[in-house]
């Protein structure tokens, strides 16, 4: 059986976790958290990155940092994971879903402006499959309407748009280190601050509403409860696990990219024959091989395709059911404009196995099985 996903594992994780345990201090912001944050700060070229307990909590911090209030509106795609929306719903926002582009499955930047009202506060973009949204157009709209931009870069660590790292272009970026992502700490994530403007505020929300970080920097002489907040710090034990993987980031990426390109080379002829639709990587975008998907004719053919792969021992899964069709999505939001692509394209999409450690033999088995389906 070729699994759809296997969580990344390098082999040095237990060593670092043992080291963390022997420190007898595995609470948040320990030595491994510091190491991960330094590595991420350097990789992303930003002044501050903070590990969080998940991308969901990084998004919640972004909701706090955007000062979202009851009745504000947030524009986002419906084709995403519920956390993208939930973080803003928790602050009292109404969701305004706009359609996606069929080529990248990302928010259609040309549909955003029409959805803006006097209540709009923020645009939340999702870089699906680690492929960038059209950020120049989106940042331009945000600037003209004085809106905040949050990048849900859960799938996009290491991907770039016109040479800029995803998660560093908007006001705040959110990463995930869940075990389904390119690098894992089990459950975990990070918030990226492209400027230091709201650093103190971010630290306060992350540390239970206290100014503990300012205290450790010697900026205040005792720490106290100054604001509302939560506890978004992961244990240093989890950070130790992530540290092992960040050190091998290139090896993980290269292996994932090799699988991605093997699939892409093998399936392009099918696309030429009009049998299948493959992912588009727009000019100026470099991706991190987070995902490989194919699009079948419709829901019926997709079901048939997934069943066929399963019966040949190849894992294959569909993805998001659009949020505007979910009970909470209906309650908290509305779809602006026509749903031309969101439902139709999500119904046809199937994801193929892609994880660190896939061998050439694994890839070939997936490729021959997919090709045999179309025979
Ligand atoms: C995985 C994912 C999340 C949630 O990440 P967690 O770390 O599990 O909270 C949010 N948004 C997108 C687009 C994701 O892929």
Image (tube, rainbow, N blue to C red):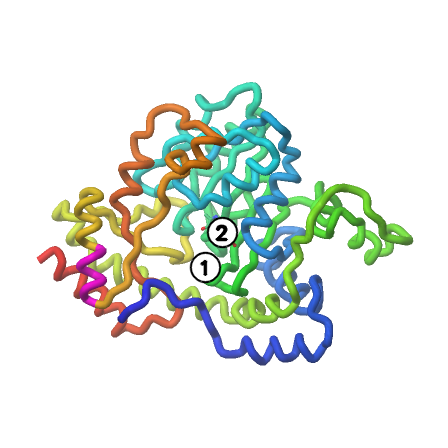
Magenta stretch?
Answer: 306-312
Q: Do the residues under discs 1 and 2 have CB atoms within 8 angstroms? A: yes
Tag 2 or tag 1, which sits nearer the N-term?
A: 2
Q: Is mark 2 within 8 Å of ligand 1?
A: yes
Name the quadrant containing residue 180: bottom left
User: Seen in the image, is 75 located left or right of residue 254?
Assistant: right
User: Seen in the image, is 281 located left or right of residue 194?
Assistant: left
Q: Residues within 10 Å of mark 2 (few under 14, many from 20)?
A: many
Q: Examine the residues drawn in magenta and state their main secondary structure.
A: helix
x and y percentages locating residue 320 in the rendered image: 37, 46
Which residue is under mark 2?
154
Q: Which residue is pictured at 52% across the width and 69% down the height? A: 245
Which residue is under mark 1?
181
Q: Which residue is pictured at 28% across the width and 69% down the height? A: 2
Reply above or below: 226 against 75: below
Quadrant in which the N terminus is drawn: bottom left
Q: Nearer the viewer, residue 32 or 39?
A: 32
User: Seen in the image, is 263 located left or right of residue 176?
Assistant: left
x and y percentages locating residue 285 in the rendered image: 41, 47
x and y percentages locating residue 238 in the rendered image: 59, 67
Tell me how far mark 1 sits from mark 2, CA to CA.
8 Å
Reply above or below: 122 against 242: above
Q: Is mark 1 within 8 Å of ligand 1?
A: yes
Seen as rendered, the residue at the extreme top is: 118
Q: Nearer the viewer, residue 331 or 207?
A: 331
Q: Which residue is pictured at 50% across the width and 39% down the height? A: 85
Which type of secondary structure does the marked residue at label 1 adopt?
loop
């Amino acid at each position: 059986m070729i699994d759809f996903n296997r969580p990344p594992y390098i082999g040095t994780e237990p060593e670092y976790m043992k080291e963390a345990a022997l420190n007898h201090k595995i609470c948040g912001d320990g030595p491994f958290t510091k190491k991960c944050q330094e590595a991420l700060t350097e990789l992303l070229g930003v002044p501050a990155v903070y590990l969080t307990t998940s991308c969901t909590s990084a998004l919640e911090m972004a909701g706090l940092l955007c000062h979202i209030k009851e009745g504000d509106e947030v524009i986002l795609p419906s084709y995403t994971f519920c956390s993208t929306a939930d973080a803003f719903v928790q602050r009292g926002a109404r969701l305004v879903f706009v359609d996606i582009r069929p080529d990248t499955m990302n928010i259609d930047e040309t549909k955003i402006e029409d959805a803006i009202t006097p209540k709009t506060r923020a645009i939340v973009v999702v870089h699906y499959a680690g492929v960038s949204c059209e950020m120049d157009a989106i940042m331009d709209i945000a600037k003209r309407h004085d809106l905040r931009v949050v990048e849900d870069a859960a799938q996009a660590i290491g991907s770039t748009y016109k040479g800029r790292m995803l998660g560093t272009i908007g006001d705040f970026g959110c990463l995930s280190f869940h075990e389904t992502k390119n690098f894992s700490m089990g459950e975990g994530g990070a918030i990226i601050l492209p400027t230091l403007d709201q650093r103190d505020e971010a630290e306060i929300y992350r540390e239970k509403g206290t100014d503990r970080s300012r205290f450790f920097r010697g900026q205040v002489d005792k720490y106290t409860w100054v604001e509302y907040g939560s506890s978004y710090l992961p244990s240093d034990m989890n950070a130790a696990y992530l540290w092992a993987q960040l050190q091998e980031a290139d090896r993980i990426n290269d292996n994932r990219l090799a699988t991605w390109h093997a699939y892409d080379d093998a399936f392009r002829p099918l696309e030429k024959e009009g049998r299948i639709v493959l992912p588009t990587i727009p000019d100026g975008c470099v991706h991190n091989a987070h995902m490989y998907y194919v699009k079948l004719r419709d829901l019926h053919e997709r079901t048939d395709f997934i069943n066929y792969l399963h019966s040949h021992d190849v894992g294959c899964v569909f993805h998001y059911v659009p949020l505007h069709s979910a009970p909470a999505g209906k309650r908290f939001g509305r779809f602006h404009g026509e749903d031309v692509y969101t439902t139709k394209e999500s119904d046809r999409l199937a994801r193929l196995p892609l994880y660190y450690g896939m061998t050439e033999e694994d890839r070939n088995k997936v490729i021959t099985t997919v090709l045999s389906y179309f025979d």
